[in-house]
Image (spheres, rainbow, N blue to C red):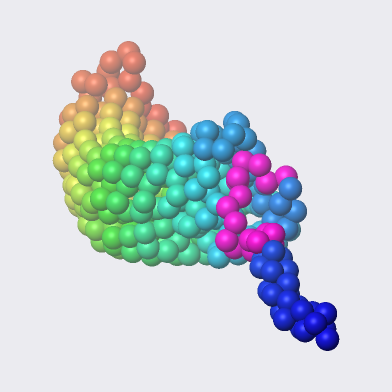
Amino acid sequence: LLLLYLCLVLRPSFARYDEKKKWMHTPAPPEDRLMNVCDLLSEQHLNMFCYCDTKTLGNATDANCWLFNDGEPEDSPVWNSFKTQRHLTKIIFHIRAVSILPYVPTRAFKHLPKLKTVEIVYANIETVEPFAFANLTLLQDLALTRNRIVNLKKFSISFLPDLKVITLGENRIGELGREVFVSLPSLRKLYMERNNLSLIHEGAFSALYSLEELELHGNQLSVVTRQTFKGLRSLRRLDLSANSLSYLADGTFMELPSLEELIIERNSLEAIDQGALANLEFLSKLYLAQNYLRTLPPNLFEDCRSLRFVSLRDNSLHTVTYQVFQPVMHNLLNGSAYLIIDGECHSITTM
């Protein structure tokens, strides 16, 4: 009887001990366990692998991360695990052709305050959400090429004080609204070539007062106005080639007093107003080739006293008067200057 009593009393205690022992040795669920993102070889449940300059915990500065199969969901524990490599200064995300990444991995970036270079390529990020990179105060170079981006929300690329270069080429952006680019005091270059841009809202670039180079070639722009370029007082190079512009009105580039190079080749230009190039005191290179211009208005270059290179090849010019080039003739007579007029030009008069 005593033995039976002891068994009945002690059995629940042993059961509780076994349960506690089992709990102590059960590994933490994946969502609670931090993984070294530079050493994911054993994490076979993940669809991502990163090659780093070192696997040592907390010591890597450069990472190339590949997503494959179905990629990783936005709430994947791997993004939180980037806190194991807080010293990364450069990260590139490559998305395999059969994989997906439909969002900017902001959850990873918030753990990487030292990042200076971020590149994402071949993702399918339809929309860049507000403050997608807001914590990266040291970021200098942001490249989002070939990601099928359609929408840039307000403040999507903003509040990045050290950012110098933004590359958004070869996406599907059709419209650029206001307040996408805000508080970017160091930005020097913005590349948005080969998108579907047909509309740039007035003031879309108004906060980019330090921008020096703007690439918009290969889009579908049919109209640009003075307000399109409002705020770009430091811009030195503007590429509008391979768009659908047919007309340049008076004062179109009035907001660009520092402009040195203007490229409007391969558009559908048929007419340019006399004051279209007003206030371009420092313009030295002008490319108007492969358009449909039949004539040029007198005094078109009145304010362009630094102009030394003009290309008008492959237009439909019939008559070019001396009066058009008279304000810059002293430059064009220089041995290093170029005036290119070919195609159907029938006469050059001095009247």
Which residues, given as a range, are shown in magenta?
Answer: 24-41
- Quadrant location of the N terminus in the rendered image: bottom right
Residue drawn at x 58%, y 52% as measured from the top left: 34
**134 vs 343: above or below:** below
- Give 298 or 92, whichever is nearer the viewer: 92
Residue 27 painted magenta: yes
- Give 320 or 109, whichever is nearer the viewer: 109
Residue 216 can be seen, yes or no: yes
Residue drawn at x 46%, y 57% as measured from the top left: 106
Residue drawn at x 80%, y 82% as measured from the top left: 2
Residue 8 x/y as whole percent: 76, 83
- Quadrant location of the C terminus in the rendered image: top left
- Give 19 or 120, whichever is nearer the viewer: 19
Give left or right: position of 48 versus 175: right
- What secondary structure predominates along the stretch shown in magenta? loop
Residue 163 x/y as whole percent: 35, 41
**305 vs 297: above or below:** above
- Give 177 or 6, whichever is nearer the viewer: 6
Residue 130 x/y as whole percent: 37, 63
Location of residue 75 (image quadrant): bottom right
Residue drawn at x 77%, y 84% as measured from the top left: 5
Location of residue 30 (image quadrant): bottom right
Location of residue 310 (image quadrant): top left
Task: Count the marks.
Answer: 0
Residue 145 x/y as whole percent: 53, 48
**310 vs 256: above or below:** above
Residue that lies at the very extreme toward the front in this rendered image: 2
